[in-house]
Image (cartoon, grey):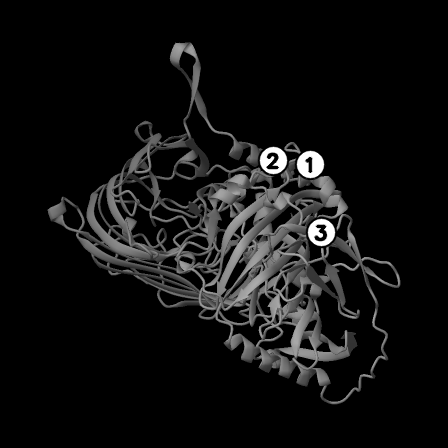
Amino acid sequence: MQKKIPLLQSSFCKPTLLFSPIVRVLFLAFCIFVCAFFVPVISHAQHLVEGIVLDAETGEPLPAANVQIDGTYQGTITNVDGQFSLQLPTLPAVLVVRYIGYESQYVDVTAAPEIALRVQMPPIVYALEEVVVSEKDPAVEIMREVIEQKKVWRAELASYSAEAYNRFTLKNDTGIVSIIESFTDTYWNPQEGTREVVKARRQTSNLDIGDVLPAAQFVANLYDDNIDIAGYNFMGVTHPDALDHYTFELLGYRRIDDEVVYDIGVSPRNRLKTGFVGKLAVLDGVYALLEVELEPGDAFLFPPPIQDFDVTYSQQFSSFGGSAWLPVDFRSEMAAEIGLNRLLSFPTFYIEQVSRISNYDVNAIVPDTLFEPGASVVVDSVSIAEDTLLDEEGIAVPLDKAESAAYVSIDSTMTLAKAYEPTGPLARVVKVSARNDDSDDEVVLAGEEGSPKRRRLNLDFSPHIRFNRVEGVYGELGIGKRISNRFNLNGAIGLSSTLKSDQAVAFSLGAQIGIDTARRLLLDLSYAEYTDTQTGSTPFLRTFNGLVVLFDGVDYYDYFRNERFRATLSFAVPETQLTLQTGLHIESHGELAKLTDYDFFDGSFEQRENPAVNSLGVHSLVAGFSFGDDEETLGVTGRKFLAFQVEHALPGLDSDHTFTRYNLSVEWRFNTFFTRRLLPNTLDLKLIGQRGFGELPITRFGAIDGRMTFYNQFGSLKTLQSKPYRGDDVLGVFWEHNFKTVPFELLGMRKAAENAINLIVFGGHARTWQSYSVLEPDLVRTTANWHQEVGVSISGLFSLFRVDFATRLDAPGFTVGLGSARIF
């Protein structure tokens, strides 16, 4: 009986299940680096052969030597100490040991040897042929043949099965932290990619991986046309367009037995484009890759908190007597520096990967059930229950001395949290957050016979404090409770220091009810009485606005007292990002006057009056839809989101206002240049639009936001300060193109590029219309014509901020502002 586990839902990709949250940032980086690869591997038999492969002249061990059972697709590679271990299905057998630059050795095995074999590899002595430098490097024609030959044999490769072994060794600056191993049966076809049946796993005792790990899906096939690594899409060195993308250079010649091997250097033609740098070994005659040693080029850059990331890849290929050239191994070494300048720093995160792929069955019949959706990883429950395969010799690539010692010495107390404990001013915050995430609220109840019984409350508490000119100091405590999968409750109570006695307290109560079991159909019911903003939105956090006011700045928002009941029914369309909504809003609006000009200084700064709101009822029906990423990012990241809403109020609904308004909000990101990078150049567009008919109350006016004193964010006018434009009709178009680090790379400013300093150009164009005049012009701002501006930003300063330089096009005006850095 087999249990199916989708790969992306396994705990391996969930740091919260794997170990303490204190290293979630580290493990997220680990997943970005590692969960981006692909390929296949090994064999289980009855006769064990162990040995060591050495240079016959120097006696030095030869790591990653290729050991195959002659006449089969089964084999292994040596470890860093030259050691190998292999199970033979039958005896007698012949082992073929190959290593570029050496004479291949054939070892007869008639019976399982009692001691380890010593395979001496004689170096091939040959005269180094002179490399003739000409206008056209010979490597270009060699690689052209490699690419053409690949097209031939790849067209004939319909599928394969194999056995895969994979090992990750995690280290810090002092030594090995943990080891993770897995062994799988692997299946591949060009349409669906890789599927695996997990047969065995093993890890040091400080890791508690509840599910299983694949093996082949963590192995990149460097013979592929396109290779995804850590979010980058690399063009492979044998891609059909590789000759246009890469520079190839013949470095010299070697031999393997009587055959010539070309050593070819490779690097991107354009250092701004994603590509590999390294060396290729090409077998003459058949024009196939024997071995590659590659690392990412200069364009391999990452945003904070990743400060530095170095990685090298090595891989060997073999034809196994057929036409297809497939990987026999994959080896990588990675080092990641993670932190936030001097504020937070983690120990260097080292990952060494060793993978072996063996026992290929080329163009095999692959079970269709393995390629069903969500079945990328299937667990062989019987094998996993026994979980002893990797303890047997000949299944894994042998551990080296340090790895063998780690399995003995590392116990459950040596957690990753200790191994990667952060330092710096923010380290304590991270530790406190980790402890809070690990704890749950509990109550103790009397169990049977008086024994204590613990029940988890799982209450969500959200305290909040702010300051403004109508409330003064306001404190609030929100409480949420998930009753069941279908039912949530939430509430809040707050107290103001300056409101009238009948308005000093604010409160809310809400419930979310799932109509269907999948929670696609939800009913939200809420009642609240509180101080709301007249625009109905808070583009700037109200706590931050309060700090600005207290430090002698302008209160950005206008306010009113709102008593409301809302009932909203939403439906999330399956398999899409589309959500449909409809609802009823019953509101009673009350006027609030300015009650304080207090600040931390002398109190001489006088805040503007709060615009009056008629104490009338607004009862309306709403309907609309949203599509895409509905999470606000405050300009830190881009998103793709569209929302449309219609609100209709009539006297028949006992509303004191009669109006209809249409509201549209669109934010969309487009990749423009250098699209193979993790962070390509991007164009972000934002559209804000409202059209109103009838007599809209001021609380239903649309708004075009400006900047709060010195602070800007995407979707606001950077040359408009202190309060927004408002009207019953509004239209705003905002755009910014982020060239990322490319301009600094072109200028040779490598340090700026490594520090993720981005160059952004932007613009904003907006106008509001007011169809009737009931508002005091000094209190509510509107436009007579289009407000237009353009500017440039430097983003990524101290990893957190951006500086915007903006100028108006329709009128005099130039400003310098600060905003949150564009991280992605």
Query: Mark 2 or mark 3: which is in front?
Result: 3
Q: In percent of the image, x 88 and y 63: which residue is there?
A: 57
Instruction: First in sequence, mark 2 or 3: give its number.
Output: 3
Residue at the disc numbered 2: 431
Give SS at disc 2. Answer: helix
Mark 3 element type:
loop
Distance between mark 1 and mark 2 Cα atoms = 23 Å
Residue at 43% across, 13% down: 451
Helix, strand or loop at mark 1: loop
Which is more toward the observer, 782 or 264?
264
Seen as rendered, the residue at the extreme bottom is 135
| Residue 405 percent location from the top left of the image | 74, 40
Q: Mark 1 highlights which residue? A: 410
Q: Residues within 10 Å of mark 3 (few under 14, many from 20)?
A: some
Q: Residue furthest left?
A: 652
Q: Is residue 526 left or right of residue 226?
A: left
Q: What is the CA distance from the residue labelled 2 to the residue labelled 3?
A: 54 Å
- Percent of width and height locating residue 652: 11, 47
For the residues marked 1 and 3, what is the alpha-carbon distance in whole angstroms?
A: 33 Å
Image mark for residue 112: 3
- Image-quadrant location for residue 220: bottom right
Q: Nearer the viewer, residue 693 or 199?
A: 199
- Disc 1 versus disc 2: nearer the observer: 1
Apparent side of residue 66 relative to residue 815 in the rendered image (left or right)? right
Q: Nearer the viewer, residue 597 or 461?
A: 461
**Residue 157 versus residue 181 in the image, above or below:** below
Question: Which three-letter amino acid code belongs to the residue tagged 3?
Answer: Ala
What amino acid is found at the position of numbered circle 1 in the picture?
Ile
Q: Quadrant of the N terminus?
A: top left
Where does residue 406 sit, x and y in percent of width and height? 71, 40
